Amino acid sequence: MTLTQRQILVMAAAALTALLASALPLHGFGIVVVVTLAGLDILLLQATAWLALRRGSGLDERQTALRDLAHRRGFRGIGMAVLLLWLVWFLSLVAVTSGGSGGAPGAAIDSGIAGRILVVIAELLIMLPTCVVAWWEVGTAEPDGIAAGRGQGGQRRWVAWLLLPAIVAAWLLAVTWGPPQSVAHGSISVSGSGPVSDWTCHEFGGGTMIGAEFGGTVGLRAYVCWNGTDAFVWGDPNLPLPASLNRNFKPFTAHDFDAAMTLETGCGLDNVSDFAAVGQTTCAERIDASGTMHYTVSARVSPIPFGIASREVTLDLVVTRTGKVLERP
């Protein structure tokens, strides 16, 4: 493989890494990006004869010096790479939110470090030295041992490609059979007065994650108010209103909702669908005779198009008329 070809591979891997580090939604195709990136990494490793990951035995002085130089330059470049990727994330976040597809400026759930970010971290730590070798080395970096043993080298080449179906199989197993995980409330928590002075309100958030960080997350975000008579979700004009509120506002229509409340209440605002599509999200509210609010969010998590191997997820939030939480995600 020529130097130009290796440099093209490095640029392609850098582009996919930047995509994963960005705030751009992947719409369930994250696994395609990860597998493609892994394929590029294998090509780079084979083009450099795995030099950056090899031990000193079997390498001549030139190869050893090149390997050590690649590690020094690679790990020195991690700081710059992190800064550039953070800039990519910030600019893409601005583009997404200004384009109207970003939702609220912050999530009501905390699902930990996203799977796409874990892949970026692994890519920087493992592949930067190899990228240095592929970008700068004009000649071949093939160790003498591999050059002499073409049969063994060829076997190593095709065995490395088994990593790709292994990644897909592990991902499918996690998304389709892995146990659901509860996602905690995030850092945003809003409390205050409600639409009437004697109402008390609080934001609730939570969710369920399918496939750990490499699947999909169904989130719940609701700004709930109560006054001792009724409890209800405030901020979504599609949900019913309690009779006690209608007595204070006549007539009361969807236009009377404070637009800012949509940042604390929203159906599907906190869904995460980077590696598995999260669709058919529905949010329903029921206020029983005792004034207790029952809020239900349902969605389908599908790792494969056309709903194949999909899983139904349901989240319930139950708050009494006095603000007591009976059930939450």
Image: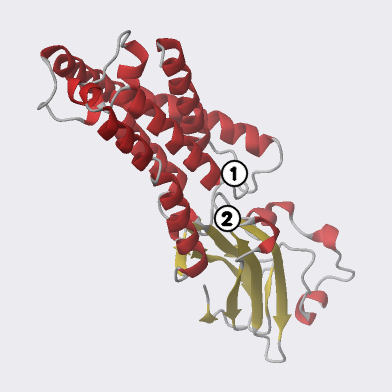
How far from the left and from the top, in percent, is residue 320?
Answer: 60, 83
Closer to us: 73 or 198: 73
Task: Look at the image and tell me whether residue 198 can be seen.
Answer: no
How far from the left and from the top, in percent, is residue 329?
Answer: 52, 72
Task: Look at the image and tell me whether residue 59 can be seen.
Answer: yes
Residue at the spot x=30%, y=37% of the render?
156
Position of residue 213 in the picture relative to residue 253 (left or right): left
Position of residue 27 in the picture relative to residue 126 (left or right): right
Which residue is outermost to the front? 151
Q: Which residue is mark 2?
A: 276
Please tell me in which quadrant of the rendered image residue 224 appears. Answer: bottom right
Which residue is outermost to the right? 251
How far from the left and from the top, in percent, is residue 255?
Answer: 84, 58
Please tell me in which quadrant of the rendered image residue 154 appears. Answer: top left
Colour pattern? secondary structure
Q: Earlier in the sequence, mark 1 or mark 2?
A: 1
Closer to us: 227 or 73: 73
**27 to 91, vertically: above or below:** below
Q: CA distance from mark 1 to mark 2?
A: 9 Å
Q: Which mark is residue 26?
A: 1
Residue at the spot x=63%, y=59% of the render?
278
How far from the left and from the top, in percent, is residue 22?
Answer: 52, 35
Residue at the spot x=40%, y=41% of the render?
161
Residue at the spot x=45%, y=36% of the render?
39
